[in-house]
Image (cartoon, rainbow, N blue to C red):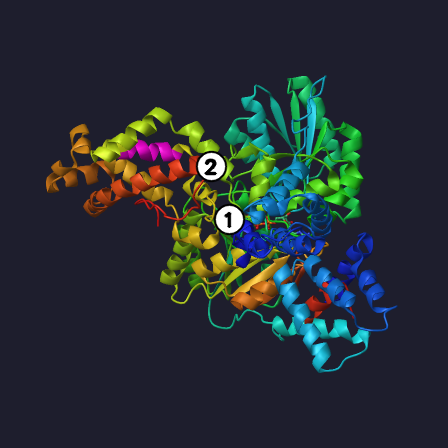
Amino acid sequence: MAGFFSRLKEGLTRTRQNLVQKVEELITGRTRIDEELFEELEEILISADVGAETALELVERLRQQVKTQKIADPALVKGLLEAEIARMLGTEAVGVDLTKGPTVLLVVGVNGVGKTTTIGKLAQRWKDEGKKVLLAAGDTFRAAAIDQLEIWGQRVGVDVIRHQEGSDPSAVAFDAVQAAISRGVDVLIMDTAGRLHNKGHLMNELKKVTRVLDRALPGAPHEVLLVLDATTGQNAINQARIFGEVVGVTGIALTKLDGTAKGGVVLSIHGELNVPVKFIGVGERVEDLRDFDPQEFARALFGREE
Amino acid sequence: MAMFEGLAEKLQGALRKLRGKGKVTEADVTEALREVRMALLGADVSLKVVKQFVSSVKERAIGQDVLESLTPGQQVVKVVYDELVQLMGGSNAKLTVASKPPTVIMLVGLQGAGKTTTVAKLAAFLHKQGRRPLLTACDVYRPAAVKQLQVLGTQLDLPVFSMGTDISPVDIARAAVEHANRHGNDMVLLDTAGRLHINEELMTELEDIKKTVQPHEILLVVDAMTGQDAVNVAEAFHAQLGLDGVVLTKLDGDARGGAALSVKAVTGCPIKFVGMGEKTDALEPFHPERMASRILGMGDVLTLIEKAQATIDANMAREMEQKLRKADFNFEDFLMQMQQMRKLGPMDQLLGMLPGMGNMKALKDVQVDEKEMKHVEAIILSMTVEERRNPQLLKDSRKKRIARGSGTSVQQVNNLIKTFEQTRKMMKQFTEMRGAMMGKAKKGKGMFRLPFMR
Ligand SMILES: Nc1nc2c(ncn2[C@@H]2O[C@H](COP(=O)(O)OP(=O)(O)OP(=O)(O)O)[C@@H](O)[C@H]2O)c(=O)[nH]1
Ligand SMILES: [Mg+2]
């Protein structure tokens, strides 16, 4: 994660609201734990998109801990909070299992969150690990979306199954699985058109894609990766909930963490839906993908690295 | 989520105990405004802005005779709402037009905000007003971004200026303006690559484009789903480029859109347009009142009323009501009513505007299947006029013919007939509900359900 943090730090030092500084100010020059400290921690959480309710809950729990454990040193408080957040997010990094024949990974999300880019990055990573990767251009709707994935395929050096713009994504899904099986690939990653989760007909279309995948290869899709943009606020909860209900999300990729947004909303999502964050995106280049690490994420919420 | 409960009701609860008390103390208002704070934060208004906002509302509310009113909660909502509207309102919501064409409009923003689509929408909008826009592909970074704009240009039958991806965006912008000069394009729309506000190199590139072509409008494109970071982004873009306006995209989603308030608050720039869908005609002017009720979770009642009034012909509606009362509502009326409803816009959007229905749970139950709706239409259109007027005529052989004619199955025809009876009732409910809404009275309970709703 060294790269991630150096980039994150670069960003942080450039922004006016330097959270590191804010927190340090908060801790230093404070000799006792008072209400102000809790309030400021709450505000940091809210500013990181954790959401007011979750932030309130977290800080309340912190208050209790401080009380029952008779903690008096203000310098310890933030560490406690970070540990609590990391605990909430699950203690271990969870990857994707690619050992059982063609693994089919469906990538979904609202418009512009970084689905196609994430697919390019994943393809590169798994190819580098010696896996045979195949891509499917399931976004047949957005102008030039197929070409975009095709360019990623060329960059990485993997094949792309494509139909024409405007064709049925389910047909792409079916063909792609056939190809994946006959070519003996390890992983098939299918792109889909960005869609807002409140559009019933588009969500039905996605559901159909999963049905067709399952028909073509029982058990598929084995992974449904929901891509969330870290810049998104509380609406991400709705996104996770509805996509989860319709296609059964198994993991989250949180993108654009190279900006100043912190993606704190995944805390609520994890709490409510128990879907783990599996990957994070920290830039537009093919190498800008990292495994999610709850502890480091928690630290980054407060703008601090090791 | 509790956040979706109407703020009005929550405030009502919080303020109930105040009723009958002599004077509102500052503490009382503070208590009430805690709910307001939570509502605004739940809508993703930036914390900084919320704090400023709440303290200014507080000042206004303390002085007022909140307790005189029977419904202090409503009163506070009104104060909050008015303040929000005022904050988001801007007198100058029009696009600046150059005295000497071409007018250059540059769109900027984060990755994935919707710039390219917005360029196409703006071009379509301007073209409709008799302008001759030139779409310009300055995004040389994202794979296939140039192609995307070209495809959109072709769809709209409007010219796209591009120079591939090996030329610097600054040079492309300059060449585009020259091209417009030569070819009589009076508007140049620059689609720039998405970038992070902290990326110095790319932010400088925008500055260079600005210096080179001196745009008349620099519009920041902001995703309505943006969270707390909206202020940082808007501040940085504004500081470096001096924005003229904002376009808020993806408002057809269910985000409460607090970013609208944040961005306006930190830049002072008016929100000039909102994006309401992926199609190139889904661009609308910004209405601060509607945005205010949306941020507060009160449902966009105003928009719905306006839409309904503009689209449903009053006489026709009255006629329909009479028919309903006489119970001789038939398939012809049904078709007409359905077409009327369609004119109101995509059903799911429409339903989202009803108070209490922007709420996801309610919407989830009422998914509208546009495809199914088309089937229903096809079936009715395959009936003879006689059959439409007299549904009892529909026996097996006729059903078969209708199914064949409409490309559906006999079962689908049966389903439609079966639900037709129920539908009469539903339609009646809709008419009643619409009536109630025009009177702005009832909350959106008593759901109606048509065969094309799931
Ligand atoms: N800074 C940054 N930009 C990213 C990241 N991931 C994706 N992007 C950019 O975000 C923009 C949108 O990415 P896409 O991959 O096209 O997003 P998408 O979800 O496939 O978009 P649609 O298919 O249009 O819905 C592009 O400009 C990407 O380069 C990231 O981690 N950081
Ligand atoms: Mg895509």
Instruction: Identify whether B195 is placed above or below A227.
Output: above
Looking at the rendered structure, the kind of residue marked 1 is Leu
Badge 2 local density, few (<14 within 10 Å), some, or many (20+)?
A: many
Which of the 4 image quadrants contains residue A18?
bottom right
Compared to residue B193, the image places residue B162 above or below, namely above
What's the chain of the residue with tag 2? Answer: B
Which secondary structure lies at badge 2? helix
B381 displayed left or right of A240? left
| Residue A206 among those drawn in magenta | no
**What residue sits 54% from the left and 66% below the top?**
A272
Q: Position of residue B146 (x, y in %)?
A: 62, 38
Per the picture, the main secondary structure of the magenta-coloured stretch is helix
Q: Which residues are magenta?
A: B334-342
Residue B169, disc: none
Task: Using the numbered discs, state the Cα–Cα distance from disc 2 to disc 1 in whole angstroms.
Answer: 21 Å
Q: On screen, B185 above or below B1? A: above
Q: How many marks?
A: 2
Residue at the spot 66% in from the left edge and 26% down from the top edge? B95
Whether the magenta-drawn stretch holds residue B339 is answered as yes
Q: Are marks 2 and 1 on the same chain?
A: no
Q: Which numbered mark, 2 or 1, is in the foreground of this view?
A: 2
Q: Chain of mark 1?
A: A
Above or below residue B198? Residue A86 is below
| Amino acid tagged 2 | Leu
Q: Residue B315: which quarter of the image?
A: top left
Return the residue at label 1: A196
In percent of the image, x 40 and y 38: which residue is there?
B436
Which disc, if any, is residue B304?
A: 2
Q: Is the residue marked 2 within 8 Å of ligand 1, measured from its CB? A: no
- Is residue A235 among what the camera can see? no
Please state the horizontal and vertical placement of residue A122, each as a whole percent of the image. 59, 61
Residue found 36% across the figure and 32% down from its top: B340
